[in-house]
Image: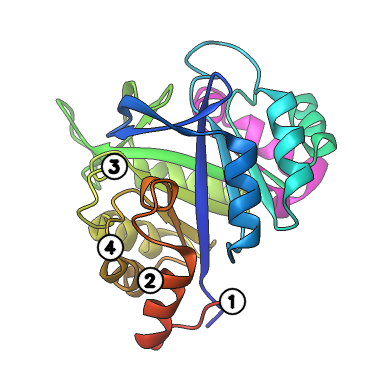
């Protein structure tokens, strides 16, 4: 088994890191550059930077903040939010990103995944999927795709979308559970299992981490990497504590 990665996530709005519950009631969590530096020094395996209002606000990613964060870290940096074209990806890679994640724009135009993969290779491309249990509609898996930072339901089956994205060339999937996001009640294991059964690409589990005991079950459900935000930002848990707990459960970490 490949070593499991532990990844802090910077959800950025207006140049500040924010965190809420189920993508709502966002609260300030600090300066992204300072947090990036701290995580780079504290054993994080990668760092994810998501401009959470770029798509809903119909604007570009905050490039100056991305560049400043990239200068502070020497671990892989994934950037997402507001990516609509191959040119957007090229600019972010020049800013210092190692990988990019696509979400709303790819749902609207799935060919974007194919275009980015052809130009840059699937190693730079992450599908960021905001999934929730279907509301007012039925899907085969019971989970639906949402867009615009979790604000809009699509009625589209989340697991079918993961399959299509993998076929089109995404290198990995960032699986965001809106139902679990910010609750600190544990990862959505049912969602992880459903995604794992559908595709072979690496899965990053996101949403719901609240204590060290929550991380190992997500790996056992099929996650290759574990992403968390508020528990790291506010000092509830450290990267070292999470990795120590995983090791004690017999899970290899970096």
Q: Is residue 145 visible?
A: yes
Q: Main secondary structure of the magenta part?
A: helix
Label 3: state its secondary structure.
Answer: loop
Name the residue beneath numbered marker 4: 211
Say the numbered circle drawn on residue 182: 3
Query: Quarter of the image holding residue 236?
Result: bottom left
| Lateral position of residue 77 relative to residue 153, left or right | right
| Lateral position of residue 12 relative to residue 95, left or right | left
Say the numbered circle drawn on residue 219: 2
Q: Is residue 61 above or below residue 30?
A: above
- Please provide percent x and percent y for residue 130: 39, 37
Name the residue beneath numbered marker 1: 254
Q: What residue is at 37 percent from the left and 78 percent from the top?
A: 245
Q: Nearer the viewer, residue 125 or 154?
A: 125
Q: Nearer the viewer, residue 192 or 243?
A: 243
- Please provide percent x and percent y for residue 119: 81, 40
Q: CA distance from mark 3 to mark 4?
A: 12 Å
The residue furthest top is 58
Q: CA distance from mark 1 to mark 2?
A: 14 Å
Q: Kindly check if marks 3 and 2 are in contact, taking CB atoms under 8 A apart as contact.
A: no
Magenta residues?
Answer: 100-126
Q: Kindly check if marks 3 and 4 are in contact, taking CB atoms under 8 A apart as contact.
A: no
Q: What residue is at 58 percent from the left and 23 percent from the top?
A: 15
Q: Quadrant of the C terminus?
A: bottom right
Q: Please tell me whether residue 180 belongs to the stretch shown in magenta.
A: no
Q: What residue is at 51 percent from the left and 72 percent from the top?
A: 4
Query: Quarter of the image holding residue 196?
Result: bottom left
């Amino acid at each position: 088994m490949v070593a499991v990665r532990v990844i802090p996530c910077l959800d950025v709005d207006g140049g500040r890191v924010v965190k809420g519950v189920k993508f709502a009631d966002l609260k300030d969590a600090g300066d992204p550059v300072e947090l990036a530096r701290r995580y780079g020094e504290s054993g994080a395996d990668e760092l994810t930077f998501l401009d959470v209002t770029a798509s809903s606000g119909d604007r570009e990613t905050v490039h100056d903040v991305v560049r400043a964060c990239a200068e502070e870290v020497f671990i892989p940096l994934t950037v997402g939010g507001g990516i609509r074209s191959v040119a957007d990806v090229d600019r972010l890679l020049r800013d210092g990103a190692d990988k990019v994640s696509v979400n709303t724009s790819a749902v609207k135009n799935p060919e974007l995944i194919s275009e980015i993969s052809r130009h840059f290779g699937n190693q730079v491309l992450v599908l960021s999927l905001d999934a929730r249990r279907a509301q007012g509609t039925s899907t085969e898996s019971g989970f639906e795709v949402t867009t615009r930072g979790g604000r809009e339901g699509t009625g589209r089956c989340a697991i079918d979308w993961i399959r299509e994205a993998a076929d089109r060339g995404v290198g990995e999937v960032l699986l965001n559970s809106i139902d679990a996001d910010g609750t600190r009640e544990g990862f959505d294991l049912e969602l992880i299992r459903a995604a794992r059964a559908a595709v072979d690409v690496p899965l990053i589990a996101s949403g719901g981490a609240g204590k060290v005991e929550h991380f190992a079950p997500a790996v056992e459900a099929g996650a290759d990497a574990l992403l968390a935000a508020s528990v790291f930002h506010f000092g509830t848990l450290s990267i070292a504590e999470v990795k120590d707990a995983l090791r004690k459960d017999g899970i290899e970490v970096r």
